[in-house]
Amino acid sequence: MSVITRPLAALGAGVLSTLATVGRVALFALAAFRHILTPPFYGREFLHALMHVGYLSLPVVGLTAVFTGGALALQIYAGGARFSAEQVVPQIVALGVVRELGPVMVGLMMAARVTSSIAAEIATMKVTEQIDALVTLSTNPMKYLTAPRVFAGLVTVPLLVAVGDAIGVFGGWFVSVQSLGFNPAVYLKNTVDFLETPDIVSSLVKGAAFGVIATLMGCYFGMHSGRGAQGVGQATKSSVVAAAVLILAANFLLTQAFFAT
Amino acid sequence: MISLQDVHKAFGAKEILRGLDLDVAKGESCVIIGGSGSGKSVALKCVLGLITPDRGTIMVDGEDITKTGDRDAFLARFGMLFQGAALFDSLPVWQNVAFRLLRGSLKRPRAEAKEIAIEKLRRVGMGPDVADLFPAELSGGMQKRVGLARAIAADPEIIFFDEPTSGLDPIMAGVINELIREIVVEMGATAVTITHDMTSVRAIADKVAMLHRGKIRWHGPVADMDRADDPYLRQFITGSPNGPIETLR
């Protein structure tokens, strides 16, 4: 009997544990948004988070976007050539970058760069009793550490996505003009004419959602880290994995919400 | 002033506090001693509300801490020096010291807060030149001093010291002990210190309480400590591996 029940019990325990984590993350997210909306507000912490999450992420976003746009142009040109449809490169690059690759690449870069550093920083603060020190100094850690970071993610990542989209399209344009023989002005005109408002809106909405996910996961796993160096490492790893998976899942749901007919 | 009655706390199956009773009078310096894992830090964290006890009552000035309405005002009465100083890495020294004065109910203008921070740093023997350094640029002893300056920055009525001399050389430990004693007397504050360091106990304490397996094993004035015949206390004071306190070898 135990041969049958033991795997079922293990499965049940796993499901319960996952559901409990989902519940805790949901409550944590609600608390974060409540603290974003209610005073006191920590302006300096918010500005610091804006710099860290937004401005300092620009180089990595720019580099990934330009190479992705360039590679996409080459792939579409090669694929289109099979059907004598090489001329669709500007339109497909624009659509691919703005609707999908721009937001997803920026989201994943946020998970790699921002989620990991937030989780490691907050987990280290927890391990070294800095979070306890905040409480004894009459400061709510959710309000001081989590709210500014999540709000910064919500505000800055759409802007990063907009920059990433523009640089990605530029990467495609540059490769198409330099290597594939496209006319620069015609390429740009085709790009601008083809893109529609919902394409850009969906891109920015995805950016906001991914920004919240990336910062929230960093804060959640940092705040709930275990003890010692191993606890910090585990929190960092879990935060990046959770952020990356949630970003891809949210991307699918948002694409479905915007474009499924 | 501080009264813990029948306080229990367990983490999972592990019972840490098993009916802790302790009273600390106003203006008194009480040192809690005991082996690692005896529940000293947990007791302090219960008083501050960082950990919620499973059972028992904790009163500060006759008021049950779980029924305190204004938590900000309650915590403003406390200062705490953490074992590793717990300074905020991202802030310069003066902002660490003046942290409470830069936000919340005790907020002051930035220039005034910096002035107070520099004055508190001077009180713990540090010059204004360290004010703009970051904690990572300081030695362990200096970090403890900054932690001490932060603990006293808002002139608290009650100060907790968690292992104030751990990790310090004997001379720096002596300096910190002296500073704590001076500051507590000068401010008229109520102090609770937890430590393993018997030199600290003799330098800081008015009263000593020994915690063993989550309960007070012995308590009394520091002058009575060496004359006490409790075998647990005697073993702890002498540091003998032989006695009723179980040791791992």
Image (cartoon, helix red, strand yellow):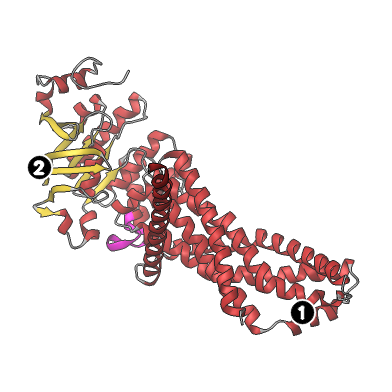
- For the question of whether residue B76 can be seen, the reply is no
Residue at screen point 13% across, 42% down: B27
Please identify the quarter of the rendering in which residue B234 is found.
Answer: top left
Q: Which residue is mark 1?
A: A191
Identity of the residue furthest to the right in this view = A181
Residue at screen point 75% across, 85% down: A193
Instruction: Classify mark 1: helix, strand or loop.
Output: helix
User: For the residues tagged 2 and 1, is the chain the same?
Assistant: no
Residue A101 in percent (x, y) is at: 68, 67
Please tell me whether residue B25 is drawn above or below residue A240 in the rendered image: above
Residue at screen point 40% across, 45% down: A6
- For the question of whether residue B217 can be seen, the reply is yes
In this view, the residue in front, A217 or A37, is: A217
Tell whether B26 sits left or right of B175: left
- C-beta proximity under 8 Å, tags 2 and 1: no
Of all chains, the one bearing label 1 is A
The residue segment tinted magenta is: B100-112
In this view, the residue in front, B140 or A4, is: A4
Residue A91 in percent (x, y) is at: 77, 78
Q: Which residue is mark 2?
A: B25
A246 magenta-colored: no
- Main structural element of the magenta stretch: helix, strand or loop? helix
Which circle, 2 or 1, is nearer the viewer? 1
In this view, the residue in front, A18 or A216, is: A18
Q: Amino acid at mark 1?
A: Thr
